[in-house]
Image: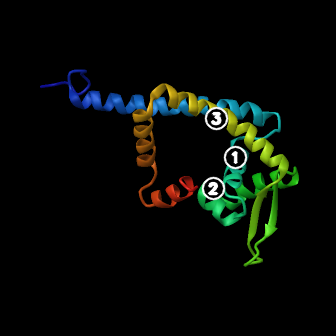
Amino acid sequence: MTDVKSANNPLFLREEELRQAIELLFFAYRDFTAGPDQILKDYNFGRAHHRVIHFVGRNEGMTVSELLDILRITKQSLNRVLGNLIKRGFIEQRQGEEDRRQRCLYLTEEGRQLEQKVSRVQRDLVARAFREAGGDAVAGYRKVLMGLIDEDNRDTVLGRVLKP
């Protein structure tokens, strides 16, 4: 009888590979967010602010409803962060042109500068990792990340991410 916890058991090796992948994802995310966290600290902002600035910057004119859909947070949580960003002049909110009930979001010039400053740190980190890994590894990495996205939402996410 083979011990399930033995390195000689293929099931154990599979479990160990999965555990390592999960831990690597944790440490990669920790280091991926470390640079932006330092920059955001100077503004008394956190990761929620970063996410809002990022997605509004990538989707100028998006509605609050669309942002809620992307972030999957409560209205209350978003209103706290968004209100702070608007009050401090990083985001502006305008009425929708077609539906005046809509609140459309735009980065201000100061918001664009902060978004570029924060994202530059992450782009440089990802670019270095891509160069070191090579094209085949990058393609595999993208497939793995796409596989982690909820299948029911995958097409919507990819439509947002892979836009020109």
Res 48 label: 1
Is residue 134 among what the camera can see?
yes
Task: Determine the image quadrant of residue 29.
Answer: top right
Residue denoted by label 2: 73
The numbered mark, 2 or 3, whose residue comes first in the sequence reads 2
Instruction: Say which residue appears at 68% left-offset and 48% top-offset.
Output: 54
- Residue 128 image point, x, y percent: 56, 28
> Quarter holding the C terminus?
bottom right
**Disc sitting over residue 24 in the figure:** none
Residue at image point 78% right, 34% down: 41
Locate residue 91: give its quadrant: bottom right
Contact check, label 3 and label 1, Cβ < 8 Å: no
Examine the rendering and report whether any part of residue 72 can be seen: no
Label 2, secondary structure: give it: loop
Q: Could you classify mark 1 by the number of other residues whose Cα lies within 10 Å: few (under 14), some (14-19), or many (20 or more)? A: some
In this view, the residue farthest toward the top is 7
- In-image side of 88 versus 97 (left or right): right
146 w.r.t. 126: above or below: below
Within 10 Å of disc 3 (Cα), the crowding (few <14, some 14-19, many 20+) is some
Q: Are marks 1 and 2 in contact (CB under 8 Å)?
A: yes
How far apart in space, not on screen, are marks 1 and 2 (Cα)?
10 Å
Drawn side of residue 147 relative to residue 59, left or right: left
- Residue 105 percent location from the top left of the image: 75, 61
Quickly name the residue at label 3: 122
- In the picture, the quarter occupied by the N terminus is top left
Give the amino acid type for the residue marked by disc 1 in the picture.
Ala
How many marks are shown on the rendered structure? 3
Question: Of the residues under marks 1 and 2, which one precedes in the sequence?
Answer: 1
Q: Residue at x 81, y 51 (%)?
A: 85
In the rendered view, would you say 106 is above or below 109? Answer: below
